[in-house]
Amino acid sequence: MRTARAFGSRARFLLDLGRAQAETTAMATGFLTIDLDALARNWTVLDKASGGGVESGAVVKANGYGLGASAVARRLARAGARRFFVAAAEEGAAVRRALGPGPEIGVFGGHMAGDADKLRAHGLVPMLNSIEQLTRHFEALPGHPFGVQIDSGMNRLGLEPAEWAAVREIAISAAPRLVMSHLACADDPDHPINASQLRCFREMTDGCGIPRSLSATGGILLGADYHFEVTRPGIGVYGGRPFEGAEPVVTLDLPVIQVREVMPGEAVGYGVTWKAEHPTRVATVAAGYADGIFRYFAHQGRMMHHGTPCPILGRVSMDLITVDVTHLPEDPVSLQLLGESQTVDDVADAARTIGYEILTSLGARYGRRYLGGGA
């Protein structure tokens, strides 16, 4: 018969095992740290750059560029943002639940079929993009606030000049909250289409008496001619180009599962695309393309250990990445992909993409923690 002491020992063992398993599970996911105060400071700088008398909104689409729209929107509201923009009505509903009544939430995708109930229930402002959407909105939600998006040369969304000319008086008589367009090449200040779109936007909107918006982050940095009455800071708020002065917002720390010695002639990873030329200590990191770390990052990218670069070896697989840590004084417990030593744009350059894609691809398996309150 088992004694009470034996049962007590077993209970303690199971308790310790449970704690260890919980800790292992937390460590295995990696940690995405989001500095909401840095994000708010970035917004404040862009707000000031927009100039006096110009209202700065905030773009929080794609779940706050992958960082959590609710936490991001609440922190930006604390910083002073009173106008927010999302891509679709479903996103707008989530942001409204986070912010409550008051702030205006514009929907870039406009009034899609089936959106009326969401727009009404959550007080969303669709940016109407076509005559079809204008008709749908006026019939389904007469008197409900709306904005208008016009096409100044990007040929993606918005009423074309001839369409706008045909409905301008009708639309303006209904008092839209905003008339907006979007710049195609604002991150390239010398591109001639910037001036062309500015000229077209002025021709289409001068004298309308309605607040206007042409600029996201890149347009803000082009100067006052592009600001009009409302700006829409986006990627710069989250620490990305073309706002070179942005503070980093995201830190991504990834746990090391195992470190092994690889001898000359031995290969690492799928396809044996990398072979050791000398004895190499290889760390296997718990992350991969399922977590938004692109396969192209293989052989191009690196991770960091307290500011020291550690090259990626072999292919990025679904859940694992192998990294050269030979030059480190001791085996690392974790390695960092994003942080002060390697920004989202550094990672994007290595992966031959853009910071937007890196941020919005960050996987759901990471543990997340927010700094600065408002989460």
Image (spheres, rainbow, N blue to C red):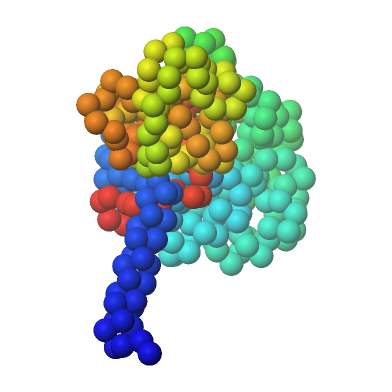
Picture quadrant of residue 341: top left
Q: Which residue is drawn at 38% across and 20% down?
A: 280
Q: Is residue 7 above or below residue 156?
A: below
Left or right: residue 196 versus residue 251 is right
Picture quadrant of residue 311: top left
Q: Is residue 264 above or below residue 77?
A: above
Q: Which residue is drawn at 49% across and 50% down?
A: 365
Counting from the top left corner in percent of width and height, residue 363 is at: 51, 44
Q: Residue at x 75, y 50 (%)?
A: 135
Q: In which quarter of the image is the C terminus?
A: bottom left
Q: In this view, does 196 lie above or below 323?
A: above
Q: Which residue is drawn at 40% across and 38% down?
A: 258
Q: In front: 180, or 316?
A: 316
Counting from the top left corner in percent of width and height, residue 163 is at: 74, 33
Q: How many labels does the image show?
A: 0
Q: In front: 78, or 38?
A: 38
The reply to whether residue 84 is in sight is: no
The reply to whether residue 281 is in sight is: yes
Counting from the top left corner in percent of width and height, residue 214 is at: 50, 30
Counting from the top left corner in percent of width and height, residue 338 is at: 36, 33
Q: Quadrant of the N terminus?
A: bottom left
Q: In front: 15, or 307?
A: 15
